[in-house]
Image (cartoon, rainbow, N blue to C red):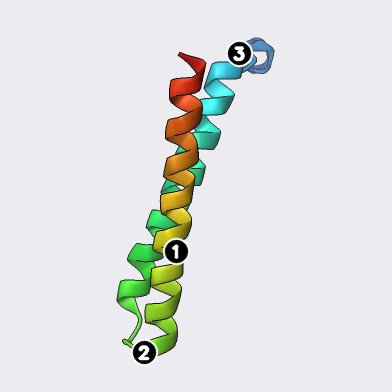
Amino acid sequence: MVKEKKEKKKQKKLTRGEKRSVWTFFTLLFPSLLLCLTITFPRSIEISLIAVLLFFYQAVLLKNFIEKYYEDM
């Protein structure tokens, strides 16, 4: 009985849309997570510089995402 359930789970494949949504979620969430983590460190010029660079990196990712999203429509 357990083997049957495992086989059913293995048979389900992700669609292209599901794969794209997971990748998009990861690429947009990861820089945000890093920005949040920089807040926990003591303030220094290096940490502030990393936070600013991450912000610009995320801005470029969002710009590319929006362009691709409206291009597909």
Q: Which residue is mark 3?
A: 5
Check disc 3: other Cα within 10 Å, few if <14, some if 14-19, many if 20+.
few
Q: Residues within 10 Å of mark 1 (few under 14, many from 20)?
A: some
User: Which secondary structure, mark 1?
Assistant: helix
Q: Residue furthest bottom?
A: 44
As measured in the structure, the alpha-carbon distance from the residue carrying label 2 to the one carrying label 3 is 53 Å
Q: With respect to residue 60, does 69 lie above or below?
A: above
Q: Quadrant of the N terminus?
A: top right
Tell me which amino acid carries mark 2.
Ser
Query: Residue 36 sits in which quadrant?
Result: bottom left
Q: Nearer the viewer, residue 73 or 33?
A: 73
Expressed as whole percent of the image width and height from the top left, the position of residue 21 reads: 49, 27
Rate crowding at label 2 as few (under 14), some (14 to 19) or many (20 or more) other CA atoms within 10 Å: few
In the structure shown, which secondary structural element does the residue marked by tag 3 occupy?
Answer: helix
The residue identified by callout 2 is 44
**Which amino acid lies under the numbered mark 3 shown in the image of this protein?**
Lys
Quarter holding the C terminus is top left
Residue at mark 3 to residue at mark 1: CA–CA distance = 43 Å
Residue topped by disc 1: 54
Report the amino acid beneath label 1.
Leu
Query: Which residue appears at 58% of the width and 25% of the height?
Result: 19
